[in-house]
Image (cartoon, rainbow, N blue to C red):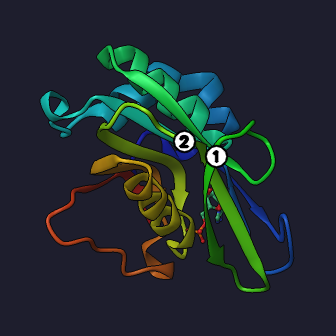
Amino acid sequence: MHPFESHIRNVPDFPKAGIIFKDITPLLQDRLSEVVAAMCADIDWNEVDYVVGIEARGFVLGAAMAQLKGKGFIPMRKKGKLPPPVIAETYTLEYGTDTLEMIQNQKPGRVVLVDDVLATGGTLRAGMKLCEKNKLEVKALALLINLTFLNKFKEDGLPVKSVLNY
Ligand code: AMP
């Protein structure tokens, strides 16, 4: 068992029935610097300009990674939180749709896209599309947890880095 696993709480039926929610707050409280170091490992930082973090736990992890590696940070938020001009990407959920937004980017660059959990992959795919629309080339994807039993996430030539795999 990975030493981080004992710091993750499995919460059944949250936020809705049938989902086993991975609560990483004890892990952040107990092991933040080790987690951030593990998420930064095996990424070629020479080819990265910025870290993009997906709201909200991707902000915590992504901003800490950016700080550790001396890179800038760009937030990707849920609809309606960022002031204009924004670029948006809408994606399909099990029921309905959701939208991610970023401030329209004036500085093209290469990025690592960060989130805490990869489940079905819908969020991450939308995040990748939004980066590309916004002149940001995705060089790597970094997750703390990949729920591999829910997805077959694979991108040709693009490293998908995850610290814990279930
Ligand atoms: P998905 O688009 O299905 O890959 O879902 C990924 C997003 O939903 C991430 O931003 C996660 O924070 C959140 N998420 C999905 N499933 C879980 C889970 N079992 N535990 C914690 N967060 C989850």
Measured as percent of width and height from the top left, residue 51 is found at 40, 33
User: Which amino acid lies under the numbered mark 1 shown in the image of this protein?
Assistant: Val
User: Which amino acid lies under the numbered mark 2 shown in the image of this protein?
Assistant: Gln
Q: Secondary structure at mark 1?
A: strand
From the viewer's perspective, tell me whether residue 17 is left or right of residue 139: right
Q: Residue furthest bottom?
A: 95
Measured as percent of width and height from the top left, residue 76 is found at 59, 44
Q: Quadrant of residue 99?
A: bottom right
Which of pointers 1 and 2 lies earlier in the amino acid sequence? 1
Give residue 86's mark: 1
- Whether the residues at callouts 1 and 2 have beta carbons within 8 Å, the answer is yes
Q: Specify whether tag 1 is near ligand 1 (CB below 8 Å).
A: no
Q: Secondary structure at mark 2?
A: loop
Measured as percent of width and height from the top left, residue 107 is found at 37, 31
Residue bearing the label numbered 2: 104
Q: Tell which of 53 and 81 is nearer to you.
A: 81
Disc 1 to disc 2, C-alpha distance = 5 Å
Q: Tell which of 6 and 110 is nearer to you.
A: 110
Instruction: Look at the image and tell me whether residue 156 can be seen.
Output: yes
